[in-house]
């Protein structure tokens, strides 16, 4: 059984589709097939990002107890935007800075390199594509620092009580 959906596209994209359809009719798939493949790819990507991010969060929460307090304080300062230099910064910018500061100081972060290199595969979507492994390894790193920050916040709340 199939379901119908409606999508909206810009005039520019519509014109390009029409040109491609007219120039290469024998090799041009039906638009519904193209959209189906794009939707499948988007859902697989979202699923993979979530898997890798979640793995990072779990590992970050576990790793929190093993890192030095000054390292945890710095991570929390950057993640919470307590450090004025990171006010309004994106998660990408924050994690990029944290990786620069701590990638050699936190043992568990080495897992991100194994994820990138394909030594560890958490879902098939990344198996044969280095670019996908690079993207999801970054999701792991983001989750890792989010996990450390979550554990830090939990400890701070516990210490206040």
Image: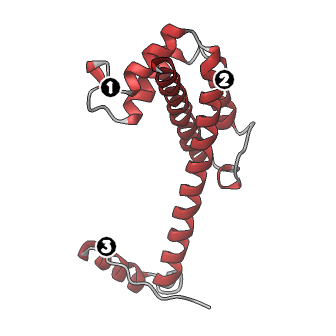
- Residue at 50% over, 76% down: 34
> Is residue 134 positioned above or below 43 on the image?
above
**Closer mark to the observer between disc 2 and disc 1:** 1
**Closer mark to the observer between disc 3 and disc 1:** 1
Q: Residues within 10 Å of mark 2 (few under 14, many from 20)?
A: some
The residue indicated by pointer 1 is 81
The residue indicated by pointer 2 is 108
Q: CA distance from mark 3 to mark 1?
A: 40 Å
| Mark with earlier residue (2, 3) | 3
**Disc 2, SS:** helix
Residue found at the far front of this picture: 161
**Disc 1, SS:** loop
Locate residue 150, reporting x and y percent.
Answer: 51, 31
Image quadrant occupied by the N terminus: bottom right
- Residue at 32% over, 21% down: 82
Q: Is residue 47 left or right of residue 6?
A: right
Q: Residues within 10 Å of mark 3 (few under 14, many from 20)?
A: few
Residue toward you, 67 or 6: 67
| Mark with earlier residue (2, 1) | 1
> Is residue 31 positioned above or below 82 on the image?
below
Locate residue 132, reporting x and y percent.
Answer: 58, 48
- Residue at 39% over, 86% down: 22
Locate residue 126, reporting x and y percent.
Answer: 65, 50
> Is residue 58 positioned above or below 110 on the image?
below
Residue 13 — which label?
3
Q: CA distance from mark 2 to mark 1?
A: 24 Å
Disc count in the image?
A: 3
Q: Residues within 10 Å of mark 1 (few under 14, many from 20)?
A: some
**Closer mark to the observer between disc 2 and disc 3:** 2
Residue toward you, 113 or 98: 98
């Amino acid at each position: 059984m199939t379901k119908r959906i409606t999508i909206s596209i810009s005039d520019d994209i519509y014109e390009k589709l029409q040109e491609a359809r007219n120039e290469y009719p024998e090799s041009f798939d039906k638009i519904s097939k193209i959209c189906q493949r794009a939707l499948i790819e988007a859902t697989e990507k979202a699923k993979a990002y979530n898997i890798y991010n979640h793995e990072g969060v779990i590992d970050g929460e576990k790793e929190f107890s093993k890192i030095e307090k000054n390292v945890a304080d710095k991570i929390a300062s950057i993640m919470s935007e307590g450090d004025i230099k990171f006010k309004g910064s994106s998660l990408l910018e924050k994690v990029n800075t944290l990786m620069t500061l701590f990638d050699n100081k936190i043992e568990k972060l080495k897992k991100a390199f194994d994820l990138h290199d394909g030594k560890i595969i958490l879902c098939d979507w990344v198996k044969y594509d280095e670019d996908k492994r690079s993207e999801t390894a970054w999701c792991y790193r983001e989750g890792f620092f989010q996990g450390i920050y979550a554990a830090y916040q939990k400890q701070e709340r516990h210490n206040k009580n």
